[in-house]
Image (cartoon, rainbow, N blue to C red):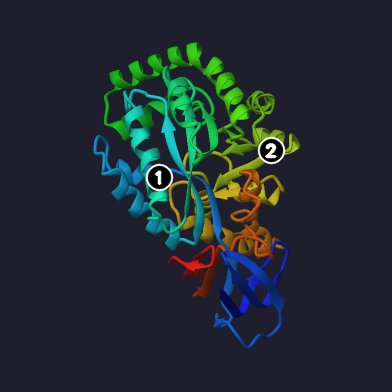
């Protein structure tokens, strides 16, 4: 049992000054006003633990350099420490499935990461709650095989359907893709041309049947499903037809507006908010918030960006409350993923809590509790 007093408590719709009581991993009391018992938080914020739906950070630890693959359990532990220290108490670790030219045999790598998460959870090695987000590369010839190998595990709770074929979605310009490929992979012009030709051929053959098959299986398994990098109205209509609930990183205002009108939860990158723009030249997440077209933030490739962005949005958008901004990294992603037991400071919810102090105008994570247990 743990209690906290003298805190600025961020609820789903407002901020109060008061105390929070927990017991057996759940929140048992939320009271406004002074309290005489409990840990004194000295006026710091107490917020719900952050919920991260899409981060490539585990893969970055596992593959820290091109061609270098780290021990998967060691990579998971390093990732877990940084995620917990960023105030995230539930993370959906993105695991890419579907082989491609960069990694011709992806399955053993995905298998090692998924198994590391399952083993670490069983051994109670981790600070926070790790779940799996399968990132399904539709044009890959073996993505269905990979999906069937992993989708049935209870740790897998979310899947996204992606198509990084040059000439559409994130890479609408072939020249932009060619520059990206040469820079990232260090290949020649001829290599880039061949890669483009190969990927276009694979996309034409596999993308549509794989999308339909994965969407069907996701529905059968009860997995939350997300689209990725929607750029057009047609992309959004495909997603709605497939039963998508989340639109990840729409690249144009047209796609974001269509997803919003269709009732999809729109997810954008927190680094986009922090930087004030997309790293790839797509729409600004802050502009979407202003337009009322964004629901969820994801740290994507910088874990601490999630908390940082939530505290920046009220400074940049007049009349936008901190409670509403923090809902984009707590309650909204939890609900979108079907996790109704967390994401909010309310009686009966999980005691996933974060103490945040403001220093020189910026948030600093001072303590993190998962189900009432101090983990960072």
SS type, badge 2: loop
In-front residue for pair 200/280: 200
In-front residue for pair 275/307: 307
Image quadrant for the N terminus?
bottom right
| Quarter-of-image position of residue 43 | bottom right
Q: In this view, does 76 lie above or below 144?
A: below
In-front residue for pair 129/297: 129
Q: Which residue is drawn at 68% across and 27% down?
A: 233
SS type, badge 1: helix
**Mark 2 neighbour class, 10 Å CA radius: few under 14, some 14 to 19, many 20 or more:** many
Residue 264 tag number: 2
**Mark 1 neighbour class, 10 Å CA radius: few under 14, some 14 to 19, many 20 or more:** many
Q: Which residue is drawn at 50% across and 25% down?
A: 163
Residue 117 tag number: 1
> Residue 242: percent from the left, percent from the top?
65, 25
Q: In the displayed structure, does residue 186 sit left or right of residue 325?
A: left
Residue at the extreme bottom? 36
Q: Is residue 327 above or below residue 211?
A: below
Cα gap from disc 1 to disc 2, whole angstroms? 29 Å
Q: Earlier in the sequence, mark 1 or mark 2?
A: 1
> Residue 317: percent from the left, percent from the top?
66, 59
């Amino acid at each position: 049992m743990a209690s906290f007093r003298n805190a600025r408590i961020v609820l789903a719709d407002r901020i109060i000054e008061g105390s929070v009581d927990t017991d057996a991993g759940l929140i048992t009391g939320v009271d406004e006003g002074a309290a005489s018992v409990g840990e004194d938080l000295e006026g710091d914020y107490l917020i719900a633990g952050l919920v991260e739906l899409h981060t490539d950070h585990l893969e970055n630890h596992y593959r820290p350099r091109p061609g270098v693959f780290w021990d998967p359990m060691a990579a998971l532990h390093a990732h877990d420490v940084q995620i917990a220290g960023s105030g995230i108490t539930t993370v959906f670790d993105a695991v890419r499935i579907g082989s491609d030219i960069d990694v011709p045999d992806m399955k053993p790598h995905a298998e090692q990461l998924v198994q590391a998460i399952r083993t670490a959870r069983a051994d109670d090695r981790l600070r926070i709650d790790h779940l799996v987000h399968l990132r399904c590369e539709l044009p890959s010839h073996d993505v269905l095989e990979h999906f069937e190998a992993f989708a049935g595990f209870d740790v897998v709770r979310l899947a996204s359907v992606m198509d990084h074929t040059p000439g559409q979605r994130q890479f609408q310009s072939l020249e932009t893709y060619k520059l990206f490929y040469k820079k990232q992979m260090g290949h020649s012009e001829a290599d880039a041309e061949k890669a483009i030709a190969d990927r276009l051929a694979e996309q034409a053959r596999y993308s549509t049947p794989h999308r339909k098959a994965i969407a069907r299986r996701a529905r059968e398994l009860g997995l939350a499903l997300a689209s990725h990098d929607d750029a057009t109205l047609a992309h959004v209509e495909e997603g709605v037809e497939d039963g998508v609930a989340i639109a990840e990183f729409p690249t144009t205002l047209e796609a974001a507006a269509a997803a919003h009108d269709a009732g999809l939860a729109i997810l954008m990158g927190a680094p986009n908010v922090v930087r004030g723009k997309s790293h790839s030249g797509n729409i600004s997440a802050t502009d979407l918030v202003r337009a009322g077209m964004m629901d969820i933030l994801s740290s994507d490739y910088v874990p601490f960006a999630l908390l940082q962005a939530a505290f920046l949005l009220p400074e940049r958008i007049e009349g936008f409350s901190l409670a509403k901004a923090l809902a984009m990294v707590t309650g909204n992603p939890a609900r979108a993923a079907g996790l109704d037991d967390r994401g909010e400071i309310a009686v009966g919810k999980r005691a996933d809590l974060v103490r945040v102090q403001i220093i020189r105008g910026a948030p600093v994570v001072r303590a993190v509790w998962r189900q009432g247990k101090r983990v960072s």
